[in-house]
Image: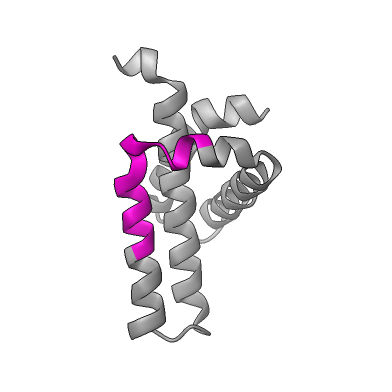
Amino acid sequence: MIKWFCKYGFIVLLFNTILYSIPVTMHTVAPFIFYFIMIFSVLFLFINPNLLREVLLHKSFLFLLSINLINLIYLFLFDDIYHQKSIEYLLARFVLFSILSLSIYYNYNYFK
C-alpha cells in the first residue's frame, strides 16, 4: 500500500485539485479527500522513516526541502504560530512536496 501511494499519490492529489475547482464539490468532497491524503501520507512517512530520509534528503529534492524550510521560517518570523490556517498551509506544502518527491523517485524510469 505504501509503495502504491508513493507511486500514484501525486495523481490522487491532482484529481483532488480538479475537485477543488468544481464549485459543487469544493466544500463537500474535496476537503474530505484532501485531509484523507494528508493523513495517510504523514502516516506513511512516519511508519517508514528510511523512505523519508532516502527520498526527501536526496540531493535532487533538496530544493523542495529548502522551500519547506523557508515556509517554516516565515511562519515563525512573520506569522502567528497559533493561527490554524497557517499551520494547515505549512503542513499541506510539506506533504505536497513529499508526495511529489516520492512520485518522481519511484517513477524515475517512466519519466526518463
Magenta range is 54-69
Image position of 59 with respect to 92: above or below: above
Left or right: 32, with 86 as reference point: right
The image quadrant of residue 109 is: top left
On the question of residue 19 being in view, the answer is: no
Q: Quarter-wise, where is residue 56 in the image?
A: top left
Residue 112 appearing in the image: yes
Q: Which residue shows up at 63% across the image and 42% down it?
A: 49
Quadrant including the N terminus: top right
Is 7 part of what is drawn in magenta?
no
- Front residue of 56/17: it is 56
Task: Tell whether 28 sits left or right of 22.
Answer: right
Q: Is residue 56 magenta?
A: yes
Quarter of the figure with residue 6: top right
Residue at 29% in and 47% down: 63
- Look at the image and name its color scheme: one colour
In this image, 21 relative to 36: left or right? left
Location of residue 1 with respect to 31 vertically, above or below? above
Magenta residues: mostly which secondary structure? helix
Residue found at x 59% / y 25%: 4
Residue 31, above or below 81: above
In the rendered image, residue 12, in percent from the top left (x then y), is placed at: 50, 36
Q: Position of residue 53 (x, y in %)?
A: 53, 41
Q: Quadrant of the C terminus?
A: top left
Question: What is the number of callouts on the image?
Answer: 0
